[in-house]
Image (cartoon, rainbow, N blue to C red):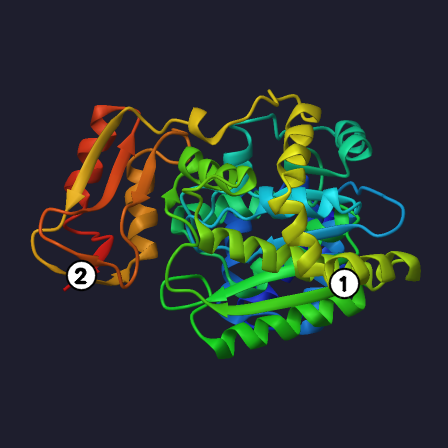
């Protein structure tokens, strides 16, 4: 009872903008993780962080308390990880990056999220191919066999308060920048990661809107990484459209597999983004590796990006991904073309000649969810055209997919209020 009263008083303090001590923050995280606060009080705390924000010291306390109120994984040596801030539908780099880094010989136990502000999260996509709700022991076994895994971060008691807070934020489709930061870092630290790359896109239609906000968020990531003795690299880049064309679980995983299989119709922008992330992550891992390995990589591949490119182009990354899928309990007989979107579809066509000027990620997310994503794995949108593409009257702009007629009709009817694409 004393712990609950301390948590309630702390939430009151934060709602009026006062700073919290570690003891107060720990009490809140403890009560949330034990499911003793309920959705309303948890929402109050989440909202207080959104409106008032947290100091760097409070962010450290929050991350530490989130980790300490749950279980942790422990691995020896270099443990790699990457995470995207998200908010960009259709950019499924994780299966590619994990496969490349694991092939290079580094451990990369990837904790992934489910959909929050996009039509699907990496965990929603990966479970098309293999179970993602793995126990602690199962994760250890998969990583021991393959060096990597792609699992749902909430599959066991890792940073449990974070998953509960995610649930209360879902209806409004928002997360505060501070909450994003703490959520990511708590999961990384709980999974034992000590070499991390953060993919931080910014743009009008994604979570982080300006370069200024991105730089502030980067500094906070760097602060927390120093506090927890984690090597980190934050990659800031402007994003106006998805890296890839598929939006929704099946469509996005198909794109990732096309890159891994090096199919002719693979999305090259997704491949480039993945190599950049994998190369950057390998770079910080290699710098802390034995001198002999560093010299071998320099001699044979030039640098970490050359190594990442070789692993992908040679097919070794695809072989590794099949190993990971098999170790997680899935069928390793993988082929991108076996992944079929929902059987009900509708092509949206151009009614005039023009050029694609804008892709509205927020509206794309709304429509994809109306179509049934992420619950309906085959639901989503395929972008037949992207920014700056020229179109003629009658050309297909994008295609809607759903697993039932009702959702498809709702998706079509919603386009007039939530246009996915502007062309003129």
The secondary structure type at the circle numbered 2 is strand
Q: Where, quadrant-wise, is the N terminus in this rendering? A: top right
Crowding at dot 2, Cα within 10 Å, few <14 / some 14-19 / many 20+, comes out as: some
Asked if residue 5 shows in the view, the reply is no
Residue at the spot of label 2: 423
- Does residue 243 appear to the left or right of 155 in the view shown? left
Tag count in the figure? 2
Residue at the (47%, 47%) spot, across then down: 116
Q: Depth check: 290 or 141 in front?
A: 290
Residue at the spot of label 1: 284
Q: CA distance from mark 2 to mark 1?
A: 42 Å
- Does residue 252 appear to the left or right of 365 in the view shown? right
Image spot of residue 162 (x, y percent): 62, 48
Q: Which image quadrant for residue 398?
A: top left
Residue at the (61%, 54%) spot, across then down: 83
- Does residue 336 appear to the left or right of 145 in the view shown? left
Crowding at dot 1, Cα within 10 Å, few <14 / some 14-19 / many 20+, comes out as: some
């Amino acid at each position: 009872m004393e712990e609950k009263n301390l948590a309630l008083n702390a939430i009151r303090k934060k709602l009026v903008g006062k700073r919290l001590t570690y003891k107060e923050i720990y009490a809140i995280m403890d009560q949330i993780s034990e499911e003793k606060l309920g959705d309303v009080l948890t929402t109050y705390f989440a909202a207080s962080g959104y409106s008032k924000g947290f100091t760097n010291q409070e962010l450290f306390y929050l991350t530490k308390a989130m980790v300490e109120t749950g279980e942790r994984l422990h691995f020896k040596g270099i443990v790699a990880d990457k995470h995207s801030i998200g908010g960009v539908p259709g950019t499924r780099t994780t299966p590619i990056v994990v496969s490349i880094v694991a092939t290079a010989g580094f451990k990369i136990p990837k904790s992934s999220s489910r959909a929050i502000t996009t039509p699907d999260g990496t965990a929603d996509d990966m479970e098309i191919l293999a179970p993602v709700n793995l126990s602690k022991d199962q994760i250890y076994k998969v990583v021991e066999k393959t060096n990597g895994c792609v699992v749902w971060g909430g599959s066991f008691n890792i940073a449990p308060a974070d998953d509960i807070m995610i649930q209360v934020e879902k209806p409004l489709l928002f997360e505060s920048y501070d909450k994003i930061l703490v959520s990511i870092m708590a999961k990384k630290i709980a999974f034992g990661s000590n070499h991390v790359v953060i993919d931080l896109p910014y743009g009008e239609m994604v979570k982080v809107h300006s370069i200024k906000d991105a730089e502030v968020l980067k500094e906070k990531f760097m602060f927390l990484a120093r506090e927890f003795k984690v090597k980190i690299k934050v990659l800031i880049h402007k994003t106006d459209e998805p890296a890839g064309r598929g939006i929704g679980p099946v469509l996005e995983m198909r794109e990732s597999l096309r890159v891994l299989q090096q199919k002719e119709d693979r999305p090259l922008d997704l491949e480039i983004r993945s190599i950049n992330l994998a190369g950057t992550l390998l770079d910080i891992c290699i710098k802390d590796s034995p001198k002999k390995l560093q010299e071998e990589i320099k001699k044979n591949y030039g640098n970490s990006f050359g190594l990442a490119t070789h692993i992908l182009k040679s097919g070794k990354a695809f072989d590794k991904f099949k190993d990971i899928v098999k170790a997680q309990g899935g069928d390793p007989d993988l082929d991108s073309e076996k992944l079929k979107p929902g059987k009900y579809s509708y092509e949206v066509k151009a009614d005039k000649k023009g050029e694609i000027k804008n892709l509205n990620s927020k509206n794309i997310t709304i429509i994809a969810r109306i179509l049934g994503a992420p619950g309906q794995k085959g639901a989503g949108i395929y972008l037949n055209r992207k920014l700056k593409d020229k179109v003629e009257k009658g050309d297909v702009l994008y295609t809607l997919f759903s697993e039932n007629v009702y959702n498809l009709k709702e998706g079509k009817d919603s386009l007039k209020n939530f246009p996915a694409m502007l062309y003129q």
